[in-house]
Image (spheres, coloured by chain):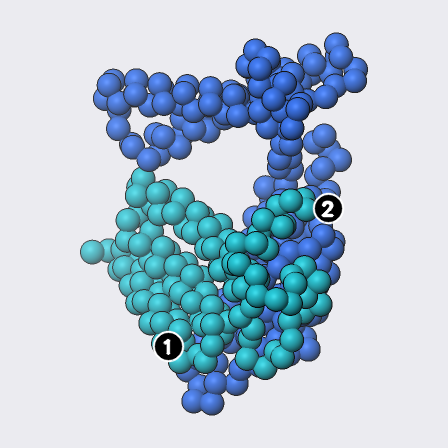
Amino acid sequence: MARKLASLTIENGESISRPNFHFDTATDLNTGRDMVRMIGAALGLGALWWLMSGLFTPLLLCLGVISVVIAVWVFERMDAADEGRLEFSFSLFRLAKYSLWLLVEIAKANWQVTKIILSSKMPIRQKLFNVKISQQSDIGQVVFANSITLTPGTITVETESDHFLVHAVAYNETDIDALAEMDRRVTEIESIPQQGLS
Amino acid sequence: MTGAELIIEVLSWIAIVGGGLFVIIGSVGVVRFPDFWSRLHAASIVDSAGVILLVVGMCLQAGPTLITVKLLIIGVFLFITGPTATHAVANAALVSGVLPLGEMKRPKTIAKKQPAKAAPVTSPRKKKARKS
């Protein structure tokens, strides 16, 4: 907490808040990366703004540029106050492959739950059970938890450090294997590109 | 109307009508299922199949325009926020002691976290925040 306050009182804009032990080179590298990140954020926001409006009159373009600049400035200020930063290091190709696989799984699960809803007996067998997780990063765990919840029939109820508590509406013994398979796939997209990037 | 346009039109209406059907099925499930937990699952059908099919159908209707891009962005956001909201609701239910039909006792990990006496609804969350 004290460090947070200290970094807030120092001049903003500089990346002082992170503890660096090799001062010269590390700071240079970090400011360089910050510049790249800032420009990337500005380009991304500009593209998003243009896609949302689709207009080209000078007034609106000026307004767009102004709002992008304000947004990037706020990002930088927030960064100065925020100690932990999110390393997002998925490879897009693997993510796309996983998304396609997930879509197929969602379609299958949808069909199963639809059958349960429409059948006259409603064969419900509810169960809460633990699922082991093997992701290292927070964002990998978030992807896994959201994938479980996105698939109809299973919901992530509670997250612990090494397992999730999952609720299933029509539990059968193969569910754990299916979730282990999903866990493996999420870990796959998470782990490999990390060495290359950082 | 050319052949390709006709095919796109037919596909888009299949997707839109199918999505509408899934929304209705999910709503029927919400009514028919017996308790809170199973109803969550019925609602998630609306979330996934209904949303996907409706967005795809509307994209086909809009064609290669900016509207399609906006629809896809909406779809991506719903994909991220939907499960998060479901998880928040389910977690709140568990913490406040709503158990699924057929589960007689709460799972061990939760039992440890919360005292047996009825606590105010806000307390478990505060506890969690302090812990981490």
Q: Which mark is residue B31?
A: 1
Local SS, label 2: loop
Name the residue type under label 2. Gln
Question: Is residue B5 visible from the viewing direction of this image?
Answer: yes
Local SS, label 1: helix
Between label 1 and label 2, give the one nearer the viewer.
1
- Between A35 and B68, which is closer to the camera in this rendering? A35
Q: Are marks 1 and 2 on the same chain?
A: no
Q: Which chain is cyan?
A: B
Relative image position of residue B123 (x, y in whole percent): 57, 54
Name the residue type under label 1. Val
Q: Which mark is residue A19?
A: none
Q: Residues within 10 Å of mark 2 (few under 14, many from 20)?
A: few
Question: Is residue A40 visible from the viewing direction of this image?
Answer: no
The residue lying furthest to the left in this view is B1
Q: Which chain is blue?
A: A
Name the residue at 73% across, 33% down.
Answer: A196
Q: Quadrant of the C terminus of chain A?
A: top right
Q: Residues within 10 Å of mark 1 (few under 14, many from 20)?
A: few
- Between A16 and A41, which is closer to the camera in this rendering? A16
Name the residue at 64% across, 71% down.
Answer: B106
Q: Which residue is mark 2?
A: A136
Q: Is residue A65 above or below residue A165?
A: above
Relative image position of residue B20 (x, y in whole percent): 32, 67
Judge from the rendering whether residue A139 lies leftward or rightward of residue A55; answer left or right. right
Circles 1 and 2: CB atoms closer than 8 Å: no
Relative image position of residue A91 (x, y in whole percent): 63, 40
Relative image position of residue B114 (x, y in whole percent): 65, 61
**Between marks 1 and 2, how big is the CA–CA gap?**
40 Å
- Between A150 and A92, which is closer to the camera in this rendering? A150
Name the residue at 75% across, 9% down.
Answer: A24
